[in-house]
Amino acid sequence: MIGNTFMRAPGEAVGTFALEVAMDELAEALGMDPIELRLKNEPEKDPTQGLPFSSREVEKAFRDGAERFGWSRRDPRPRARQEGEWLIGMGCATGTCPYYRMPGGAARLTLTRDGQAIVDVAVHEMGMGTATVQTQVTAERLGLPMDAVRFNYGDSTLPGLIMAGGSQQTAAIGASVIAAHRTLVGELLKLAGNDSPLAGLKADEVACRDGGLCGLEDETRFESYASILGRAQRKSVCVEAEPPQPMETMHWSMHSHAAMFCEAAVMSLRANRGSAASSARSTAAGS
């Protein structure tokens, strides 16, 4: 597992609203269709970073969306379309949300001879179930019951320092725990040595189950954690690791894009002074 990204958050909408309004005002001043103005100014690369886009199909989104929405029916003149007491207008906007890589920090994983596991990560729990989820991840990875796993957090002296925000913490910690688990498996295989049924197997050739390691292709090649640590005369084994950084994506500017359309109806105050109401329908095409 490599770096992660958020899946929600309201920040982008707040920031782009003013820009999209300015584009509409400029289009009106120039006598241009708002879509054509936007497409005329489509950048070939990220104007803030100078990086090429990993993908960008804004033009296709606008063309497809305009056809589905019926943009050709739009009258650009203000107050030009009225249906009874209602003034009808159409609008469009570009939607975007960046993909920021959020790699997990380090996690420390300790396994004891009596089959207990301890996970140490400097994160905080705000009621979203972080401790429970990571206990589940660790237990499943190690083939242990949940009550055999203790998750330590809320201490800045622990490794990791993973922020809770941007929908990233659960996935980021999970990536760290998985990285630590893989390192732990490698250490256990070294400790197992040549006298183990696991002799000669590599980390990606074994699985964890029933409090021990077994071969993926031959599950009869099994040895418990207690047996491995006992033969090595170790009370425990402790490792610390972090997931690989997603460097292969850093040379791209990565975003999700969309073309947004809306039709709004506003009651004319001339028809009914002192009251106002509105309704709207909208559609979107994304890339």
Image (cartoon, rainbow, N blue to C red):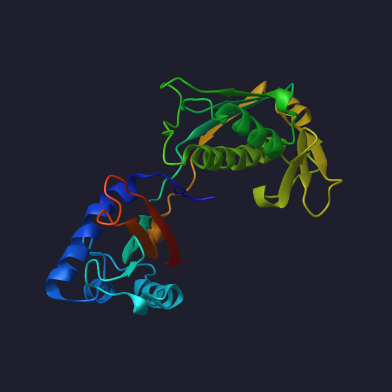
Indicate the quadrant containing the C terminus: top left, top right, bottom left or bottom right: bottom left
Residue 56, quarter of the rendered image: bottom left
Q: In the picture provided, is 151 more to the left or to the right than 280?
A: right
Most foreground residue, 189 or 33: 33
Identity of the residue drawn at 30% across and 70% down: 81
Looking at the image, residue 238 sits to the left or right of residue 94; the answer is right
Say if 27 sits above or below 238 in the image: below
Q: Residue at x 48, y 37 (%)?
A: 169
Of 5 and 25, nearer the camera is 25
Q: Position of residue 66 (x, y in %)?
A: 39, 75
Place of residue 3 in the rendered image (x, y in percent of width and height, measured from the top left): 46, 49
Against 210, is 253 above or below? below
Q: Quadrant of residue 90?
A: bottom left
Q: Quadrant of residue 231?
A: top right
Q: Out of 279 and 236, give the one closest to the viewer.
A: 279
Q: Determine if residue 251 is in view.
A: no
Residue 156 placement (x, y as % from top left): 41, 22
